[in-house]
Amino acid sequence: MDAADWTDIEAIFAAALELPPAERPALLHARCRKRLAESDPSDVLARSRVAYAHMQLGNVYQELDQLQKALDHNREGVRMSESLADLDPLHREQFGEQLFALATAEWQAKHAAVACDSYRRALGIVSDLVAAKGLPLTEIERVTARQGELKQSVATKCGS
């Protein structure tokens, strides 16, 4: 995928946001599936973007209170981003973000134990990134803020 492909995907999400909430999933599902099916699944950048698209679809479905679809997309995003996590710090961070999104959806679906596992995994990843200082300076502040959020979620929701 090149910059034009990514622009197309962003346009799909922008178009979905202009629709009433009930109509967004159908548009996103149809257009993203078509677009993403055309990409090369062996391309690391493409796989990273597909994982990101799953996270975004999970967020949309979660906002629409369609939790099973949100969980399905978040789980697929985690699966895909986990396969890329060891490539570099930015892919590792994306994996942490995917886990955070999954944990949030699992918590909303009242799957507390599963949510806490994902919160803890995400916290471990983010904490490792902060400690290793492997991220660009532009990312460190955001990742440190996420670390604080995750610590709070683990403490308040998971009791440790």
Image (cartoon, rainbow, N blue to C red):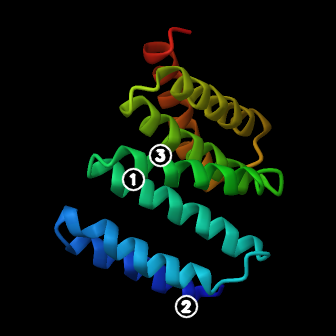
Which quadrant would the C terminus be assigned to in this image? top right
Residue shown at 67%/75% (left/top)? 46
Given contact means CB atoms under 8 Å apart, are the residues at marks 3 and 1 in contact? no
- Please indicate whether residue 3 sits to the left or right of residue 153 in the image: right
Front position among marks 2 and 1: 1
The amino acid beneath tag 1 is Asn
Residue density around tag 3, few if under 14, some if 14–19, many if 20 or more, within 10 Å: many
Q: Is residue 115 above or below residue 98?
A: above
Front position among marks 3 and 1: 3
Residue 83 place in picture, x, y as percent: 77, 54
Dot placed on the residue nearer the N-terminal end, 3 or 2: 2
Residue 63 place in picture, x, y as percent: 29, 50
Return the residue at label 3.
71
- Please indicate whether residue 93 sits to the left or right of residue 60 in the image: right
Query: Residue pushed farthest left?
Result: 20
Q: Secondary structure at mark 1?
A: helix
Residue shown at 60%/81% (left/top)? 37
- Please indicate whether residue 1 sits to the left or right of residue 30 in the image: right
**Would you say residue 136 is visible in this rendering?**
no
